[in-house]
């Protein structure tokens, strides 16, 4: 009886693995087909969905953020493709690294200067902070009336454990050459001098941000400074302030391209090929999430993240 149960368990495990393998292969071929450059395509669609960071997607668990390296690669691919006449950036991002945002913004500038291709940002739910920095570099910005746009500000924070160390009688022995070398260490409080150094750097990046938006959106620095306090704005207010050009979505973005270039837009989506390991990991994590969600729903009410109606 025990041997039969063991065989049954082994059979079930292999069955689950076989099903996951089948779903993974199906998704792999589906993903590859969606990424093909279709004949006649003249508009590249590049998605910026998630926090923006510097680096490469090397991990199977790295699909929750966007790297400047991959976005710049897509921009360069569109630049080299003579069939591509315009690029739409589909944005749904709260921002991220100032460096990564600036790198993408500069790549968009280079694209416009070297090829004169039209660039459009399509902001969906959120295009804030670094994501708006990116969007401001394009020729035209379309945003949903309920989207959150702007957040022209800079933030830095850190955890500080010095009180916890005192509680357990643990001493932080400070050995540095250069008085600011351990600035920001979680094991000691910031001195006033260290805070001033951080604030000075944040203010400098904030000034860069304001200058970029002013230059890109044809506004004065004084105009931008009036609302460059970290606030986000819904679509209509963002349009009034000059942060966006039109209320709308994908349709309006395509209409702008069609009218400006006198072409019939045909979209091709530029996206990173997904490895089989990434697909398999994603499938397994989604299955685990679904089980957990089912258990959680039985215990408590669930609500969608963000603004809901």
Image: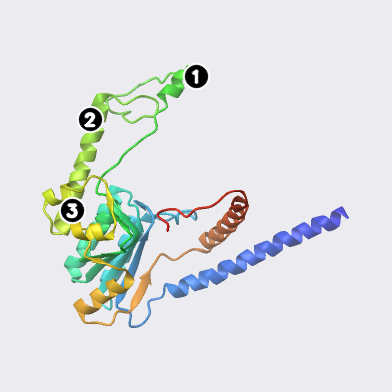
All told, the count of numbered labels is 3
Instruction: Please tell me how crowded label 3 is: few (under 14), some (14-19), or many (20+) other residues with Cα within 10 Å.
Output: many
Numbered badge on residue 212: 3
Image position of 207 with respect to 183: above or below: below
Q: Earlier in the sequence, mark 3 or mark 2?
A: 2
Q: Earlier in the sequence, mark 3 or mark 1?
A: 1
In this picture, residue 289 sits left or right of residue 135 = right
- The residue indicated by pointer 2 is 196
Along the viewing direction, whichever of 241 and 253 lies nearer the viewer: 241
In this picture, residue 156 sits left or right of residue 271 = left
Image position of 75 with respect to 130: above or below: below
What is the CA distance from the residue labelled 2 to the residue labelled 1? 30 Å
Label 2: element kind? helix
In this picture, residue 188 sits left or right of residue 83 = right
In this picture, residue 166 sits left or right of residue 208 = right
Q: Are marks 3 and 1 in contact (CB under 8 Å)?
A: no
Along the viewing direction, whichever of 197 and 136 lies nearer the viewer: 136
Q: Which quarter of the image is occupied by the C terminus?
A: bottom left
Give the residue at the far front of this rendering.
Answer: 309
């Amino acid at each position: 009886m025990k041997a039969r149960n063991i065989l049954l368990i082994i059979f079930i495990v292999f069955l689950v693995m076989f099903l996951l393998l089948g779903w993974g292969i199906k998704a792999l071929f589906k993903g590859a087909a969606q990424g093909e450059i279709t004949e006649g395509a003249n508009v590249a669609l590049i998605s910026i969905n998630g926090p923006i960071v510097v680096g490469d997607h090397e991990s199977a668990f790295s699909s929750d953020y966007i790297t400047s390296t991959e976005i710049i690669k897509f921009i360069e691919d569109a630049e080299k493709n003579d069939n591509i006449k315009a690029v739409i950036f589909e944005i749904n991002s709260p921002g991220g690294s100032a460096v990564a945002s600036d790198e993408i913004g500069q790549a968009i500038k280079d694209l416009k200067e070297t090829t004169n291709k039209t660039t459009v940002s399509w902001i969906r739910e959120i295009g804030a902070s670094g994501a708006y920095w990116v969007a401001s570099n394009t020729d035209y910005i379309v945003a949903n009336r309920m989207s959150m746009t702007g957040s022209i500000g800079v933030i830095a924070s850190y955890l500080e454990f010095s009180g916890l160390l005192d509680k357990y009688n643990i001493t932080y022995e400070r050995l540095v050459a250069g008085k600011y070398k351990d600035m920001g260490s979680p094991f000691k409080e910031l001195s006033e001098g260290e805070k001033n150094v951080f604030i000075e750097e944040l203010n400098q990046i904030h000034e860069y941000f304001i200058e970029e938006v002013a230059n890109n959106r044809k506004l004065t620095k004084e105009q931008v400074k009036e609302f460059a306090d970290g606030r986000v704005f819904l679509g209509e207010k963002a349009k009034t302030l000059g942060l966006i050009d039109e209320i709308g979505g994908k349709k309006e973005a395509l209409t702008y391209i069609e009218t400006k270039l006198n072409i019939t837009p045909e979209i091709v989506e530029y996206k990173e090929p997904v490895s089989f390991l990434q697909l398999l990991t994603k499938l397994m994590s989604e299955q685990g999430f679904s089980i957990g969600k089912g258990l959680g729903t039985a215990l408590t009410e669930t609500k969608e993240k963000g603004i809901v109606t």
